[in-house]
Amino acid sequence: MLNTRDRPPPYKPEDEEVNKYFYGFSGNPKLVASTGHNRWVKSLSTEAGWGQRLVQGRKYYLAVQDPEIIKNWNKDKGLSIQVMGLLDQCNWSCFFPVRTGLRDDYNHPKGVPTTILLIAVEPGSLQWEAGIKITLGCRDLIQKLGIFDVEVEIMEGRYTEYAASIELEPFFDRKDVIGKHILPLLPYLGYPVASLEGKKWQGTMGMHVKLGNDPKIYGLTCWHVVWNDRKAHESYKSLEDNQELIKLRELRISKWDEIYQWDPPEDVPPPDENDRQELATLKENLARYALTLKILEKYDERKDRQIGHLAFLQSFTLSLRQLGYFRDWALIELDLSKFPRAPDNKVVLNLPGEVANPIGLPFPEKKLVLPNADITSPKFVVKRGATTGLTVGEMSAIEAVVRRPGHGEDKDVFTWELLIIPGSGPRGKGNVADRFSQEGDSGSAIFDASGTIVGIVVAGNASGDWRGVPDKQTSSSREYKKLKGGLNIAPQDADKTDITFAHPIKWVLDDIEEFTGQKVQLA
């Protein structure tokens, strides 16, 4: 192994490297400094499809697997505290060890992934001259532990929080695309939640819980989803537009009637028995969709989609009980008359266009359970969020360190959070596998193959994004692109990847129990 003293010194990157080094990461973050000594060369590959142009390879994240790095990082949080000391004079937001690699436009990996300590700082706040001193100091700390295969990189980026009808359930069909539009109005987990009064943010209902012997059922989401100078007992509702697909079906049926039944063109043969059967099926579906639409029209008004009111809201502060936990939860008391059955904790799996059979879950729906102990070991996990639906990721064995300016009485506070690496499911507009979560997914329950809940989504590292998404009717802060499957995403971030941060579910439930004085159990 080459001694670092024998290596050429790090160099100041040119403008193209600054702007393109992290190509593939959400938000297009800029490179500030890196301890790497090899000159950067843009990786090019042939464009997927018919274009055949040369396009730049995209970076992606992988979880750290080296047991020595994991052991030293998690041991007493000593190393991360020393890193915080080196970052004391810069405006940083988060840092964590991670592996990064390159993939071509066909999603094929290129080369060997590298392990780095990735540090995110506020955009425009740090120049290379100061940044390189920090990276070299961090690398020296790591090498003193006998770990020599880790570089340190600083990028610009932020820790950004990602801010039911009784009659509809008979029309829900997992095999039909319309099911994705009905699902948000049913009592399955993962439906959207936002303020009835038109406040700015919306997120996801992650769990349905009870407190002690209280028969009431509460919905658990994030504090930052519901908070906006709000008081307890203000109302919440669920959102979704459900009509677009039905109109497309109606148009398809009218074309069939025109072409095959009343005026068949000369160059089109008469429909055979299969065509007629498909037409009959489509007509049956149309009748069902029309009835569904009629029901949905009853919920066009926001007040008609009210599902409950805010009951418990913990202060948005650092916990005194659990080291490194920043309390970010809210409980909404649900109006059970708005649900076709008592809300439980089932998650729908395998809807059209989603990841097929994620991590070996064989059931059309999965009932979630609480863990018996704190879960920190790495594993593949799943979540259903109001924005991205069902996605797969890998929970890293390493926790991220996050700086929260202004949340202490007279100083910043620092927290430790679960790190979720995006999964490698199928790519495409209908299924954004490069992201585990996106704006509007805050509060989503994260669970493993056994259905055990391990945490809830709270944030990501994409610059300028919230996992609590602005309501497009009340916010014009960014431009949205509507993707197939209902995902709203900034055009420049399509097919980009980012990290998801999550709170361990045990920390959340322990804090709820301390605040309410009641034992938390699943409904």
Image: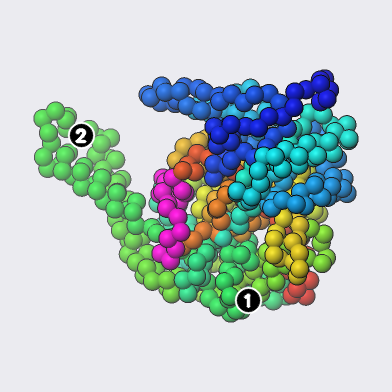
Q: Amino acid at mark 2?
A: Pro
Q: Write the start and end of the magenta stretch as one range.
A: 473-491
Who's the residue at 77% across and 52% down the image? 88
Q: Amino acid at mark 1?
A: Ala
- Cα separation between marks 2 and 1: 59 Å
Comparing 303 with 229, the one in front is: 229
Comparing 460 with 134, the one in front is: 134
Q: List x then y, in percent, for residue 321.
A: 83, 65
Q: In the figure, residue 415 lies in which quadrant?
A: bottom right
Who's the residue at 76% across and 42% down the image? 134
Who's the residue at 72% across and 38% down the image? 132
User: What residue is disc 1 on?
Assistant: 311
Q: List x then y, in percent, for residue 372.
A: 79, 55
Dividing the image into 4 quarters, which one contains the C terminus? bottom right
299 in magenta: no
Who's the residue at 46% across and 59% down the image? 477
Judged by its main secondary structure, the magenta piece is loop
Q: Which mark is residue 85?
A: none
Q: Earlier in the sequence, mark 2 or mark 1?
A: 2
Q: Which mark is residue 271?
A: 2
Q: List x then y, in percent, for residue 504.
A: 73, 55
Does residue 488 lie above or below 269 as drawn?
A: below
Q: List x then y, in percent, for residue 101.
A: 63, 30
Circle 2 Cα neighbour tier, 10 Å, few/some/many (<14 / 14–19 / ≥20): some
